[in-house]
Image (tube, helix red, strand yellow):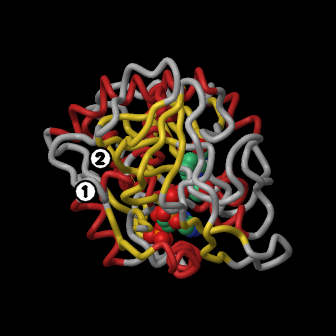
Amino acid sequence: MRAVTIASQAGAGKLALIVTDPPEPDDGEVLVRVAASGVNRADLLQRAGNYPPPAGAPPWPGMEVSGTVIAAGHGVSSPRVGDEVVALLEGGGYAELAVVRAAQTLPVPDGVGLVDAAALPEAVCTAWTNLVDTARLRPRERVLVQGGSGGVGSVAVQLAKALGAFVVATAGGPERVARVRALGADVVVDHRADDVVAAVRDATGGRGADVVLDVLGGGGLADNVRALAPGGRLVVIGLQRGRRGELDLSALMAKRAVVTGSLLRSRTAQEKAAIVAAVREHVWPMVADGRVRPVVHARLPLADADDALGLLERGEAFGKVLLVP
Ligand SMILES: NC(=O)c1ccc[n+]([C@@H]2O[C@H](COP(=O)([O-])OP(=O)(O)OC[C@H]3O[C@@H](n4cnc5c(N)ncnc54)[C@H](OP(=O)(O)O)[C@@H]3O)[C@@H](O)[C@H]2O)c1
């Protein structure tokens, strides 16, 4: 099969198309003929040699795919050969074939094409587990989605709305602001032009956000804490503005706030299976009835994987970029 692998692990690695042996499904796994693979920021780190895949995963990037099951290992009753699925992988999605634990697959939701469905697993599972499992978002609470224009953020905005929250989101520039508003956000703040904390306070009657879903990390920490309401929960899922920041503990104490974070990729198989099962039960109906839609910026051939990563690197993508073998 063809796969995209990292030609150089040192410095600015480049991706190269290779021909390699197809993987075989082990017990509890299925083999998927990939229709599309979602591109993630973690793939940029992996290409640069800074984010090795977990033990046992193929060396090539790709943490999510859509496709058709063409073989199943021992002990798999579902999905079946011939089923169209999306899947959350440990790695190895940038290929024509990929193996995945059966418990990390979901059926392609009604109303979504097989290729575009690859935009869903990583973004939906990340948004769900952080907004619901970690932040305990409740209906009518106010949520700030930092990066509502991104692959994760574009889904998080729709999911938070579908869960009954009041959604404030950020995006860079008027055009992206308008597009995030069209996804259903109640208020969208242009983080390049406006004071995000002041805008959150205005939008929430001075109270602040009960939940902040953050992709900025260290450089955004101070503002995110300032944006929190009493009892607020800040969940950091990205470090686009650095891994270190200064935390004003007195503000945390005064607000009885919580700062936490999580990584999906390094969760255990059991944890991922539980997240996938919850997504199937709670989010898939929202996808089927159109409340949560995949947002696809571009579909590129597998051979253009470097160009696909470039769209993320330069901040040009709105929503997800997909690679199609
Ligand atoms: N923890 C996890 O399990 C997990 C899972 C998936 C992804 N992630 C991480 O989550 C982050 C987002 O992923 P993604 O796939 O959504 O990436 P993406 O599609 O590249 O989106 C990046 C987002 O960050 C926003 N952004 C950049 N600088 C900003 C700033 N100064 N202020 C406000 N927003 C800013 C961008 O907004 P504009 O372009 O509109 O300015 C865009 O919405 C990445 O760091 C990724 O590694 C974490």
Q: Observer-nearest residue: 323 or 220?
A: 323
Residue 250 higher or lower than 197, as above or below? above
Name the residue beneath numbered marker 2: 158
Residue, x 33% and y 69% (percent of image)?
177
* Dots 1, 2 in contact, CB < 8 A: yes
Which image quarter is the N terminus in? bottom right
Q: Amino acid at mark 2?
A: Gln
Residue, x 44% and y 42% (percent of image)?
87
**Residue 108 coordinates in the image, percent (x, y):** 28, 42
Q: Quadrant of ligand 1?
A: bottom right
Q: Residue furthest right?
A: 10
Q: Residue furthest front?
A: 21
Q: Residues within 10 Å of mark 2 (few under 14, many from 20)?
A: many
Name the residue beneath numbered marker 1: 183
* Relative to 307, 117 lies left or right: left
State whether label 1 is within 8 Å of ligand 1.
Answer: no
Q: Secondary structure at mark 2?
A: helix
The residues bearing labels 1 and 2 have C-alpha atoms spaced at a distance of 6 Å
Q: Amino acid at mark 1?
A: Leu
Question: Where on the picture, by quarter, is residue 70?
Answer: top left
Residue 59 higher or lower than 159, as above or below? below
Work out whether residue 196 can be spotted: no
Work out whether residue 242 can be spotted: yes
**Residue 130 coordinates in the image, percent (x, y):** 51, 35
Q: Observer-nearest residue: 231 or 285?
A: 285
Residue, x 46% and y 32% (percent of image)?
72
* Relative to 26, 70 lies left or right: left
**Residue 12 coordinates in the image, percent (x, y):** 77, 79
Residue, x 56% and y 79% (percent of image)?
310
**Residue 77 coordinates in the image, percent (x, y):** 39, 19
